Amino acid sequence: MKKDRVFLIGVYWGEESKEHYSESMEELHRLADTANTEVVRSFIQSLRKPNTATYIGKGKLSEIKNEAKNNNVKTLLFNNNLSPSQSRNISDITGCNVVDRTELILDIFALHATTRQSKLQVELAQLEYAYTKLKRKWKHLSRIQGGIGFRGPGETQIEVDRREIRKKTIILKKKLESIEKTSITKRKKRSDKISIALVGYTNAGKSTLFNKLTHENRYTADQLFATLDAKTRSLVLGNGANLILTDTIGFIRNLPHKLVNSFHSTLLEVLEANLLLHVVDVSHPNIFELMDSVYSVLEEIKVDNKNILVIFNKVDKVGGNHFKFLKKKLMIEYPDSVFISAKTGEGLDELYEKINLFTIKNLKTVTLTIPIEMQNLVSFIFDNAEVLEDDFNPENNMRKITIKISRQLLPNIKKQIEDFNLKKKLGI
């Protein structure tokens, strides 16, 4: 399939340096590659403030128009988000299709969505973003199936479009709620196990690490957003502890808010995890900025106060004095972190130890008084806990057991004992 030829366009202002913004433009280039386009050229302009009508300066826009015509370029990819009028004005002047940063990310998500859930999530995000823009009228809504309803008396086309988007959005949200209920049921069935979620900037190596830890073969690629759907598998530690590990969607700078909302059901895996493994590409030149982007999303979904273990990945890609200095700095700032290569397996033993240490800290020492009739529960406790003391009182037919057990298992055990005692008291 022939690739779209595109120009990349960015505008920066204020205190942001050209060097810093160039790095942001490099990420836009990677996004464009992921979207399967052919990048012909990049344009960067520094302004005191963006042009209210065309975002970019009119002189630069005239240059872009001529260069687009000479190079047979029909699409302009902006590293900024544009207002509907700015998009329309740029398109009118240049004769090119105009795509802003959020639209590009949404297109990539649409390209990579494979499950019914992720396809619905992407479609919802696209519709909600389209609602705020409606810049290309009918063409912009070409993804909406079933046709637009008849126009009412006195209605403008935009009003018709907006009403249709609202109707479609309600339908999509109901479908996603149904899927979310099923997901919640599945999570409840495994609520007695420690849950761990991988989070991190896109292309940090989360899926590669997931494959290594779970012996899976999840799709990986050296591109942004190679995988979108959360995937959950068992993780068995050397001591026999059986945990749940979930690989989640990658984050990115300025992740569109609509996308965070639409992927709420996927991010529930992060919300309900007992431990987050924050996978970081230690070879990336802007490592701290990418980490801040991840923490920003975690803060937005209100999980920034969870237990987080930082994993500096891709140590196989770095070396020399610069890395020695960086590693020393990172170890001071993140003393409990671990340095690994998910690709080669280096450092995985230490990672297993860190996870095992968390499971030990997650244990709680309690003393339970259990009726002698509850033999199945006693057997379960012996299989899933460390028994410290076990005494039987023949006077009341009660077993007093002191154990170290996972905090996830404890509520269900206590409830079984309470229910049994209540039924016994009521003579049921």
Image (tube, rainbow, N blue to C red):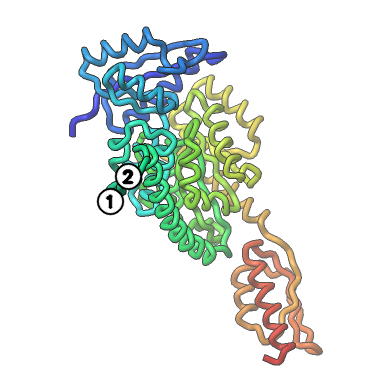
Q: Is residue 211 visible?
A: no
Residue 186, position as x, y percentages in the image? 48, 64
Residue 310 sits in which quadrant? top right
Residue 67, position as x, y percentages in the image? 26, 12
Hey, which residue is sitting farthest left in the picture?
1
Identify residue type, mark 2: Arg
The residue shown at (35%, 19%) is 90
The residue shown at (43%, 12%) is 45
Which residue is tagged 1?
146
> How far apart are labels 1 and 2 at the CA level?
15 Å
Residue 55 sits above or below residue 369 on the image: above
Decide which of 136, 337 is in the foreground and name it: 136
Relative side of 272 to 201, left or right: right
Placement of the N terminus among the 4 image quadrants:
top left
Residue 377, position as x, y percentages in the image? 63, 78
Decide which of 299, 191 is in the foreground and name it: 299
Other-residue count near label 1 (Cα within 10 Å), few / some / many at <14 / 14–19 / ≥20? few
Hey, which residue is sitting farthest front in the picture?
153
The residue shown at (45%, 44%) is 249
The residue shown at (41%, 57%) is 175
Hey, which residue is sitting farthest bottom in the picture?
427
Element type where label 2 sits in the image: loop
Which residue is tagged 2?
151
Relative side of 113 to 250, left or right: left
Hey, which residue is sitting farthest top in the picture?
59
Relative side of 110 to 203, left or right: left
Residue 342 sits in which quadrant? top left
Element type where label 1 sits in the image: loop
Disc 1 or 2, which lies upstream in sequence?
1
